[in-house]
Structure formats: C-alpha cells, structure tokens
Image (tube, helix red, strand yellow):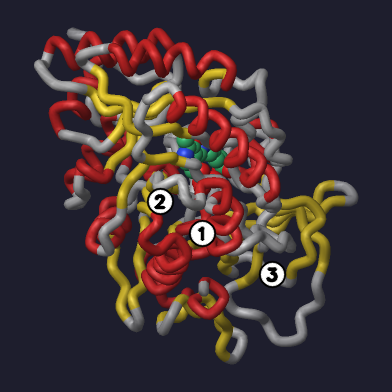
Amino acid sequence: MSDSAFHRRSGRLFAEEVALEEVAARYGTPCYVYSRAAIEGRWSRYCEALGDRGQVCYAVKANGNLALLGLLAQAGAGFDIVSGGELARVLRAGGDAGRVVFSGVGKGSREIRRALLAGIRCFNVESGAELERIAAIAAETGTRAPIALRVNPDVNPETHPYIATGLAESKFGIPLEEATALYRQAADHPSLDVRGIACHIGSQLLNVAPLREAAERVRELLDTLQALDIPIEHVDMGGGLGVRYRDESPPDPADHVEAILPPFTETGVEILIEPGRAIVAEAGVLLTRVEYLKENGARTFAIVDAGMNDYLRPALYDAEHTLEPINTGAGRPLRPLDVVGPVCESADRFATGYPLSVEAGDVLAVRSAGAYGSAMSSQYNARPRPPEVLVDGGQTHLIRERETVDDLMRGESLLPGG
Ligand code: LLP
C-alpha cells in the first residue's frame, strides 16, 4: 500500500498526489510526512483479515498524533495504550474508551484511576503487585476493574534484543506457570472482573512462527482456566509485525492474523491484536536536507539537518533505513556517504557508506519513518521537534506544528533575582 502511496514521477518522489519537494518548501526540514491512504489501507488489511473474530487495537505508542488517532477512531479502531497521556490523546481524538486496552509494566495509581473512571475495556496486568493495586483502586472508586493478565510465554521472537519482550528474562509479563494461581485470586476478588489473557512477545518480527508458538501456549492456559470455571472472553495477542525498512520481506497483516487465529478456532473467544508499526511505519517518511558535504580523511560525510533527537531509531537500535533523494539528479555519480546529523554524539548517524548522489541543499527522504519516529523525538541539544504533515490525495494538512524556541523553555523559570 505504501509503495503506491510513495512513488516517483519523472524522478520526483511523491506522497499520493503531492511532490515532496513542495512539502519541504512549504513546511521546511526536518519534517515528517504521512500518507492517509497508506495508513487507512494498512488498517483495513488488518480489519479484513480479522473479520468478526475480534478487534484491532492500534498501539498508540507507535505514533500518537491526534489526527492519525482521529482517522483510526472514525474507522472504529480500538487502541492499546501504555499511559494516562496516551489515554488522554485517544479520548481527545474521539476514540471510544470501551475499546481501549491498557498495557505497560508500571501503571501509576493516577493512571489506573483515570482509566477506570473513563471505562476502558481492559487492563493488561503485568504482576501480582499491580493486580493488587488495581483491585484496591477499583474498590475505592466503587467499580470493578476489567482485567487480563499479560503472560510471558517464553518464546524467542527473533528480533533486536531491545524490542524482544517475550523471553523468560524480560521485565514484561507474568511467567505462564504463575498465571493460573493469580487468575484464581483475581476471579475470587469482588473488585476484579476477569476478562481475558494478554501476551506480546516483541516487535519488528519478520517471521510469524514465534507468534503461532505463543498463541499455542496461550491456548493451553485458556484450557486450564476454562477447566477451572474461570470464564475468558478474549485473548489479546499483542502487536509486533515487522515492516520493510531496507530490504526485509515482512509478512503481511493477513499472515499475522492467520498465525494467531488457528489455536483459538472453536474456543469462542474474541481475539484482540495490537499492531502499531505495521499500520504507520511505511506510511511515513522523514524529510531532511543535506547541510554540508565534508571530507574527513577517507570518509565523506553528508551532514543533514535531522538528528537523533528527531529520529532515534538508528542511534538506539542501529536501525538501517532506505534513504533516497526526493529528486534524483540527472547523471550524477553515486558515492558512498556517511549520513550523519548535527547532534553532538557519534551515534547521531543515519547510515555508513550509503551510496547516494547528493549535493548540499538536496533533500533526502528517510523511508518507513512513520512509526516510533515523531513519537520518540526529543529536544536534545535544544532542538525544536519537527512538524508532521498528512497528505490526503492532493492536499496537505499540518497536523503538528514545528516547535519554537519558546516551546523549548516552556514551564522553566529563572531563580528569583537570577
Ligand atoms: N503491544 C504491546 C504490549 C507493546 O509493548 C507494543 C510495542 C505493541 C503492542 C506494538 O508493537 P508493534 O506492533 O509496533 O511492533 N521503539 C521500538 C519499538 C518498541 C515497541 C514496544 N512495544 C522501535 O522503534 O523499534
């Protein structure tokens, strides 16, 4: 879908009907650009694959821009949140609290209270201590908290260690062998309402086999609970589907759904899934301008105006993305360039020895930057965060303004007399 949303016409890269050079000229660089058609296309692929077997809950952490959440809310989306801030975003965007699941390993009391009062669908509980806290807050507020336990199936998701969550040594989830005792406790508690089982094994998975293995382990737990007369309405199998950053061949949303459904055939449980990256990553690019070319010994650097504060994935995970000039220059030779940002860290680097044909002033598109891009940006080095633009057909919408220098200092003050 995103392949057709981003395409070249006579050497110029377009998002839908809009030339990216126009976006760069109008909104400046660095700048995130998303395609509405690409996002909606991926979203409907998931919904069609899941059909009436369950609900897709978009993982807000991947990209929580209000306009994107609003589009998905209008399409009937559920949402996977991990904080009170994400809940506030979903509600502001018109999302339905009754379709919200609350994940995350360290939910705070205030966040739990707000989510309970908002009437969310389910808390995905990460420990016995958290279960007790949720029960106490539910008792205090005179409600019953809908819960699922997030179990850790001890499956190797075969991904980067920073985003693997389903192994026994990870901080996430409750070991499968401890889950049954905790479910018994929860089922007996007057302030808790057991609804489901939750599981998420990791992110950027390029093979669905570990997802199937996790589903099979969750199915065994489901059987155990049903034998104990603990009714389970839904199973939430998390997110994790990988995308194409450079030359990966990721499975499709339909492959993802097909991997997790079969173990639950004829169980009657509803299936939830929480894709984030797979909905928005390929639907976005980061535009960045080459400020300087610099020769240092044997290396040639392209110093660009986006840094690790704007886009952290290369520095944090050594992520490699396709980089391409938005306008291909006629006949200029390719040469290997180290593409680096202006931030004062050696890790501020997009690529090493990447074959490009660019001059100072040219604009590059960092492809597949729609997920965990703007969401993970910071103001490090006192750099205002970039704007976000949504392209819809031939129109562009500024859906987040570029920050100003005043925004950088908002809420700070000098000492009295200082
Ligand atoms: N559900 C839970 C409980 C999660 O922890 C996550 C991601 C998701 C769903 C969505 O996963 P996705 O479908 O996007 O793979 N910043 C990292 C990714 C961190 C993912 C954390 N959890 C990156 O840029 O690669």
Q: Nearer the viewer, mark 2 or mark 1?
A: 1
Please tell me which of labels 2 and 1 falls first in the chain. 1
What residue is disc 3 on? Answer: 358
Kind of residue at disc 3: Val
Lower position in the chain sequence, tag 3 or tag 1: 1
Crowding near the residue tagged with mark 2, few <14, some 14–19, many ≥20 C-alpha atoms within 10 Å:
many
Q: Closer to the camera: disc 3 or disc 1? A: 1
Picture disc at residue 28? none
Decide if ligand 1 comes within 8 Å of the CB at mark 3: no
State the CA–CA distance, disc 3 to disc 1: 17 Å
Q: Is residue 290 above or below residue 276?
A: below
Residue that mark 1 sits on: 286
Which residue is rendered at x = 27% and y = 12% of the image?
189
Q: Secondary structure at mark 3?
A: loop
Q: Amino acid at mark 2?
A: Pro
Question: In x, y percent, where is residue 163?
Answer: 61, 35
x and y percent of residue 31 in the render?
44, 58
**Nearest to N terminus: mark 2 or mark 3:** 3
Ligand 1 within 8 Å, label 1 CB: no
Q: Residue at x 65, y 48 (%)?
A: 205
Whole-number angstrom distance, CA of label 2 to CA of label 1: 9 Å
